[in-house]
Image (cartoon, rainbow, N blue to C red):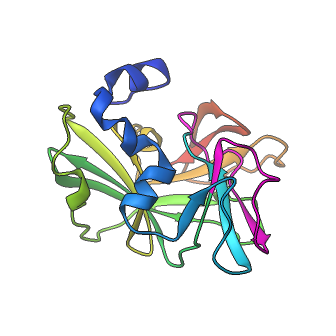
C-alpha cells in the first residue's frame, strides 16, 4: 500500500500515533535523546531533526555539535545520539519481511541527499516494539541504522514501486546524466526530481 500525506495520517489508529513521533519512539527504545529545551548529557555531536515529519525525505535533519543546552533549536525538533552503520529501509507485510534496501550517501552531503538505494538480501527481524499495535496495517516500513530502529511508517517504501532493484535519486540542480541501462521516472519530492531506476 503506497500512502501519501493525508491518506497516511488518516490511516493511523490514534493509539499508534506515538510510533510516528520519532522522539517518543527513540525514548521508548532507550536511546540517548530528548526534546528541544533539555540539556544533552555531554558535549558531543548529535542528530537534530523534527519529532514528526510526515513529509519524509529527512527534511531539516542535520548533525550538530551541542555543548549542553538546546534552546536555540525549533521547539518541534529533538536531539538524539548518532548511530553508525548501514541505513536500511525494510518493508514488512503482515510482519513478514518482503523488501530490504540499503542507502548509499556521501558523508559530505546533507542527510537527505542520498546517492543510491538498492535491494539487498539481508534478514531483518520485525521489531518487537510493534507487536501490539491497536490498528491493522497490511504494510509497515521500518528504517534502521546499524540495526537500530529509527523510523516507522504504516505503508510501503514508495521508491521501489517501479519493479526496480535500484533507485538513483536525481536532485534539482544536478547536471544531466544518462545512466545506461536505467530509465528515468519522475517523482518530485522536496529537492528531488525523480529517479533513475532499473
Where on the picture, by quarter, is residue 109?
bottom right
Q: Which percent across, then down, holds residue 84? A: 54, 78
Q: Which percent across, then down, holds residue 71? A: 78, 54
In the image, what residue occupies the spot 80% across and 46% down?
Answer: 176
In the image, what residue occupies the spot 32% across and 27% down?
Answer: 14
Q: Is residue 159 visible?
A: yes
The quarter in which the N terminus is drawn is top left
Q: Is residue 198 magenta?
A: no
Where on the picture, by quarter, is residue 52?
top right
Q: Is residue 63 magenta?
A: yes
On screen, residue 37 versus residue 51, left or right, reads right
Q: Principal SS element in the magenta part? A: loop
Number of numbered discs:
0
On screen, residue 55 versus residue 124, left or right, reads right
Magenta part of the chain: 53-78
On screen, residue 185 versus residue 9, left or right, reads right
In the image, what residue occupies the spot 50% across and 23% down?
Answer: 5
Q: Which percent across, then down, holds residue 184? A: 60, 39
Where is 10 relative to 136, above or below? above
On screen, residue 114 versus residue 124, left or right, reads right
Q: Work out whether residue 15 or residue 180 is closer to the camera in this orientation and state it.
A: 15
Where is 15 relative to 133, above or below? above
Q: Is residue 157 visible?
A: no
Where on the picture, by quarter, is residue 146?
bottom left
Q: Work out whether residue 35 or residue 148 is closer to the camera in this orientation and state it.
A: 35
Where is 178 relative to 162, above or below? below
Amino acid at each position: 500500500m503506497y500512502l501519501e500525506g493525508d491518506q497516511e495520517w488518516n490511516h493511523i489508529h490514534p493509539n499508534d500515533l506515538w510510533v510516528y513521533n520519532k522522539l517518543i519512539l527513540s525514548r521508548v527504545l532507550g536511546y540517548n535523546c530528548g526534546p528541544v529545551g533539555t540539556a544533552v548529557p555531554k558535549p558531543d555531536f548529535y542528530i537534530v531533526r523534527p519529532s514528526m515529519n510526515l513529509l519524509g525525505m529527512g527534511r531539516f535533519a542535520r548533525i550538530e555539535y551541542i555543548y549542553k543546552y538546546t534552546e536555540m533549536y525549533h521547539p518541534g525538533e529533538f536531539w538524539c545520539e548518532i548511530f553508525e552503520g548501514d541505513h536500511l529501509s525494510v518493508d514488512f507485510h503482515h510482519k513478514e519481511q518482503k523488501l530490504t534496501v540499503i542507502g548509499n550517501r556521501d558523508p559530505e552531503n546533507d542527510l537527505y541527499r542520498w546517492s543510491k538505494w538498492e535491494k539487498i538480501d539481508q534478514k531483518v527481524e520485525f521489531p518487537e516494539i510493534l507487536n501490539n499495535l491497536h490498528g491493522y496495517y497490511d504494510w509497515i516500513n521500518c528504517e534502521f541504522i546499524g540495526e537500530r530502529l529509527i523510523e516507522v511508517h504504516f505503508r510501503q517504501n514508495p521508491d521501489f514501486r517501479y519493479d526496480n532493484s535500484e533507485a538513483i535519486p536525481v536532485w534539482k540542480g544536478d547536471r544531466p546524466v544518462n545512466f545506461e541501462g536505467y530509465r528515468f521516472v519522475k517523482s518530485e519530492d522536496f529537492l528531488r526530481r525523480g529517479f533513475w531506476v532499473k
